[in-house]
Every structure is written in C-alpha cells, then in structure tokens.
Image: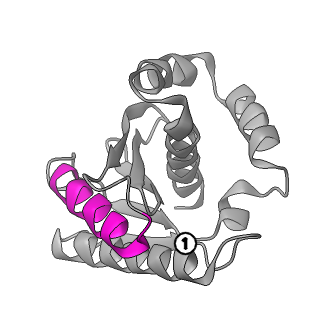
Amino acid sequence: MMTGDKVIGIDPGVNGIAYAIVDSESNILEAGFVQGDIANTELWAPRAISAFSSFQHVASNLPYAKHVFIEFTYARTGASIPAIATLGYVVGRLYSLYEILAYEEEIRLVSPSEWKHSKLTKKEFLEVFRKKLTDKQNEQLEPTLKKHKKLVQHNIIDAVGIALYGLSVI
C-alpha cells in the first residue's frame, strides 16, 4: 500500500451502517454510524432501505479510498431468516454503491470470523480489540464513540476493526 492510500471498513446492519476510514499509517481518519429514518418499525425491509438510503448520502461525501472492506454475515446464531436475508440485501446494495462510486481497486466482502480471527463473545472481543489499539488510535476513536449511543458503539468499533484488517491484507 502506498503512503496516503486509505481503507474503508463497513459494518452493515438492518438499523444502521457503521463505517471507518484508516490511512496507510493505521490512523483512524473518520468513523461513524448512520441510522435510517425508520428505525422503530418491526418490518425488516423498510428499516434496511432507510438505513442504506441515509448511508448513501454519507458515502458519497467520504474521502476516496482505494480499498473497501464490507462485513458479510451469512449466518448468525439466533438470527431469523428474514434478518439475515435483509442484511444480505444491505450488503449487496453497499457493494453496488461502491462500484458506482468508482472504487476500482478493491471491494471485498469479509466474514466476521475472517477479520476477527476469534470466536470470543461480542463483549469479550470488544475488550480485547480496544486493548490492541494504540493509545493514538483510541484517542482518535473516542470522540466518535462519545457522539453515538452506547447501543451502536460496538458497530463503530467493528468498522474500525474491518478497516484495520483490510489494511493488513492489502
């Protein structure tokens, strides 16, 4: 990877989409969580469409990155088939969005087990991962986490993990 190149990591969800951008020196340049307008409905599809629509506007204004890594979950313990199918829809739309935005270098789907290298619980993983970040990275991440509800902070941390994983494999 050349100096100045960037990687985007995306943790898609039905209710919102977390993203993080890191540079070639592993600095966290930007991170956030974009929620749709229709978060309080029991219907999966409207929530997902709303989340994607909101993210689409954010994505078109993010700095260009040569590499995009999107988490792709095809199975999850306890998740319903409609939830997984809807998540697949969101992932497909994200992939297409980055093709349209001319991300020609690399758009890659990665499974949680591929980028996490772990079978820890979500809580255990978050504790371990935060300790692996440098002091500088934690300082870069903290203001973003403070801006978002605790409920979605793990998604932002995952997006950072996905971006850093992408940085390590390119």
Q: Secondary structure at mark 1?
A: loop
Above or below: residue 141 compared with residue 153: above
Mark 1 lies on residue = 72
How many dots with numbers?
A: 1
Above or below: residue 124 compared with residue 144: below
Whole-percent x, y for residue 130 in the image: 68, 30
Display coloring: one colour
Q: Is residue 69 left or right of residue 3?
A: right
Residue drawn at (42%, 29%) of the image = 148
Res 8 visible: no
Residue drawn at (21%, 62%) of the image = 53
Whole-percent x, y for residue 83 in the image: 54, 74
Residue drawn at (59%, 40%) of the image = 154
Res 59 visible: yes
Residue drawn at (17%, 75%) of the image = 100
- The magenta-colored residue range is 42-58
Q: Residue 75 lies in magenta, yes or no?
A: no
Most common SS among magenta residues: helix
Whole-percent x, y for residue 166 in the image: 53, 57
Q: Residues within 10 Å of mark 1 (few under 14, many from 20)?
A: many
Whole-percent x, y for residue 79 in the image: 67, 71
Q: Residue 57 lies in magenta, yes or no?
A: yes
Q: What is the quadrant of the N terminus in the image?
A: bottom left
- Along the viewing direction, whichever of 13 and 126 lies nearer the viewer: 13
Which amino acid, mark 1?
A: Phe
Image quarter of residue 144: top left
